[in-house]
Amino acid sequence: MTDSASVPSHASVVVIGGGVMGCSTLYHLAKAGVTDAVLIERDQLTSGTTWHSAAQVRALRSSRNMTELIRYSIGLYSTLEQETGQATGWINKGSLSIATSPDRMVHIERQAALARLYGVRAETVSAGVARDIWPLMNAEDVLGAVWSPDDGRVSPSDLCAALIKGAKARGARVFEETAVTGITVEGNRVKGLETSRGPIRTDAVALCTGLWSRQAAAMAGVDVPVYPCEHFYLLTKPVPGITGNMPTLSDHDSHLYIRDDSGGLLVGCFEPMGKPIAPEVLGESFAFQLLPEDWDHFEPMMLNALHRLPALETAEVKTLLNGPESFTPDGAFLLGPAAETDGLYLGCGMNSVGVATGGGAGMALAHCITEGAMPMDLHEVDPARFPGCWNDAAALADRAPEVLGKHYEITYPGRQWSSARNLRQSPLEPAWRKHGACFGQTYGWERPLYFGKTGEPTLTFGKPDWLDLVAREVRAAHEEAAVFDQSTLGKIAVMGPDAETFLNRLCSNDAARAPGSLSFTLLLNQDGGIEEDATLLRLSDEAYRLSVGTGAVKRVMAHLRRGLLPRERVTLRDETEDFATLALAGPKARFVADLLGAEDLRALPYFRHMELEIAGIPVQAARLSYVGEAGWDLTCAAKDAPALWAALEQEGAAPAGFHAQTSMRIEKRFLAYGHDIDTDVDPLTAGLGFALAWDTDFIGREALERRREQRQAALATGGGGEKTIVSLLLHDAANMPLGHEPVLLEGEIVGQTNSAAFGHRVGLPVAIATLDWAASKADTVEIDIAGHLATASPVDGAVFDAKGLRMRG
């Protein structure tokens, strides 16, 4: 499939890597009209990982848009042969996922509810029906299963051949046995690349280099935290009882996936702890080779397989295939623009779902390159979600085996990673440990989730064993004085003579306020979608501080940098690690401040900030609340944080963790990015119109003006097609919503929960949900919690202190 010996001197887009992601991206670029797109492959197409993929295509994922990517793949794989004449090997026999434990059954019921929400065909079935679908299975310990008839599998090599045929028919070119030796970057922008067949000038490079992505991205100054692990599956010779293609069988409690293969069986595993293998051990020449068989490592999985498939006892083994796969620190792939270098786009770290996702992911990446944005919100796979500490080889080698092992683990609420911890620590981490903190990891940071429990938590879908501890912390913030460590929130300095005009363009709220002001604002895209929510402090005429979510710093820094105009006099700096922030909240917070000589804080109006000293420590105090109780965010130099906490503790303040903050912010209907809002949500739908300064020329304003007219017209006639974000107050304290559950009215799905927690101040579970506008006016709705319908009342606003009197009092 290789073109002539010389690469072109220029191409609009160059795709590096000839696996399924590269082939799909090239195909979709060409289909979008980029007829001079070029693909460069160091060896041959499908080499590395794609060629030995088990190639299962299962549609249901944890979010609607990730599910839509695979549904797109299914549609593409089933029709590509008709378009190109090249078979893809698409086999639509469905998938069956069994449960052999009560908690797995709950997990399966939640999957089935999610499928209904996303419009995916899936149903829970009995053990007997499961046995009928898969007759070779030992079903004695099976409790039930979920059956998904639209799933299937594909031939990876044939699929790539069809994608390349479709791309070349539209003018794209492919160069195999061509190495990329360098990527040229000038002023944070890709300008071209060097290859073994000559240079290519280009403004856009799609990096789809699989196992070698970390090294390839380094040529452009970009961090790509991916690391290989060995991945095993067993192939047998023909087995009696297999006469044709069968559904894929998943026994996740035993860490197995099983399907037929050429009349025999393919038995693969995601064992509890994988085997990492350094990229340098694989070497650059690794292409269609395999790693050595390791029967000792596979033996526990083989015993599980013999239990599930008695026919294996007499089956003749062909091979134990051991091929490397690449994994990221959180088990989700990397898709989209690199934060560090403009013009570099990533489609890698596929975590064993490359073939399943490749069609949709290639479409989305091509759309991002040609249109400047993803076709839908895909924040879960945004490359900017990882800080630089995750590019460390030792941390990746530690984490990747656990990521492989969690591939089939039950996704309990509160589940945490155990490997590669303590990469980033708050300056208050030693103090929190003394108080018995249980930590969770976010953006590399260790954050206290709750205090006072020793040992590992017991994970469950029911009442968590930390609930009473969280209740105590909420009570402290509601009745006394509590401190929440907000030090990990991103703090971005925006400085310079043009800072005000720059921020009035990038932010939705008015930045032309006097020093000492504080405002809630949004960063929007051109379509009016929410890129991030933030608080903006004006420090002086030419200096601001933008406070953003813990995991948003890299993404927001890139968004701001791309928004700078030529010769605009603005400097951006990430100051997150320079400062610590302690949020002092509660009705007795003012007494704590008084005892520390900070009486001036009493006079500070809501949404204002001031500089003062507390216990001799210089502090920037901001009057706001993330939990709905009166208090201040106290920001000081990171080195001074332990002394500030000691002073607050001495006067009676108690520590409170992230779970308490989450419970309280949900009671207040304070929306969280990535849970309740994202780029698919506009401020009007979210009820955030108060953060829009319509008289300023902010990015997205024109789109929102059109949207406002459309929404007003729809609401005037009953709200057809419009959605809104509301609170849901559940009626029974025993129900435990987690988020991403369907919401029903009179048996019809009318929305979904986003965030959920037990509301300790109201004594009932609370959810933030996106509903059809008309349904939000109903007296009651039902939430499908793993097949159980829980009754709840929609509330237009907060379920606690709706007028906000406590936090302003």
Image (cartoon, grey):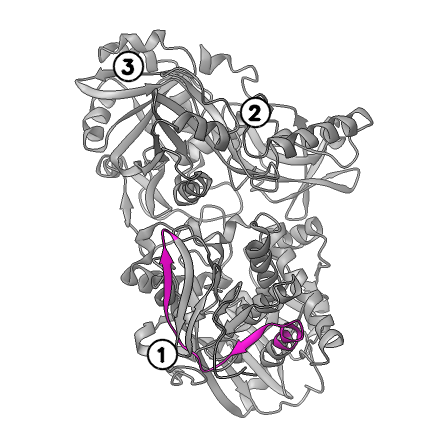
Residue to which mark 1 is pinned? 284
Q: Earlier in the sequence, mark 2 or mark 1?
A: 1
Residue 342 appearing in the image: yes
At mark 3, the secondary structure is helix
Residue corresponding to mark 3: 592
Question: The residue tagged with tag 2: helix, strand or loop?
Answer: loop
Q: Which residue corresponds to the image point at 57% horizontal and 81% vertical from the top-left?
A: 266
Q: Can the viewer see residue 140?
A: no
Q: Secondary structure at mark 1?
A: loop
Point out the stretch of residues depicted in magenta: 163-188
Q: Is residue 761 magenta?
A: no
Q: Amino acid at mark 2?
A: Leu
Quarter occupied by residue 655: top left
Quarter holding residue 286: bottom left
* Within-10-Å neighbours for mark 3: few <14, some 14–19, many 20+: many
Return the residue at label 2: 692
- Characterize the local packing of mark 1: few (<14), some (14-19) or many (20 or more) Cα atoms within 10 angstroms: some
Based on the displayed image, in which of its 4 quarters is residue 483 positioned?
A: top left
Label 3 is placed on what type of residue?
A: Val
319 lies above or below 115: below
Q: Measure the alpha-carbon separation of dots 2 and 3.
A: 35 Å
Nearer to us of marks 1 and 3 is 1
Front residue of 260/344: it is 344
The amino acid marked with disc number 1 is Glu
Q: Position of residue 798 (x, y in %)?
A: 58, 23
Q: Cα distance, mark 1 to mark 3?
A: 62 Å
Question: Of marks 2 and 3, which one's residue comes earlier in the chain?
Answer: 3
Q: Are dots 2 and 3 in contact, CB under 8 Å?
A: no
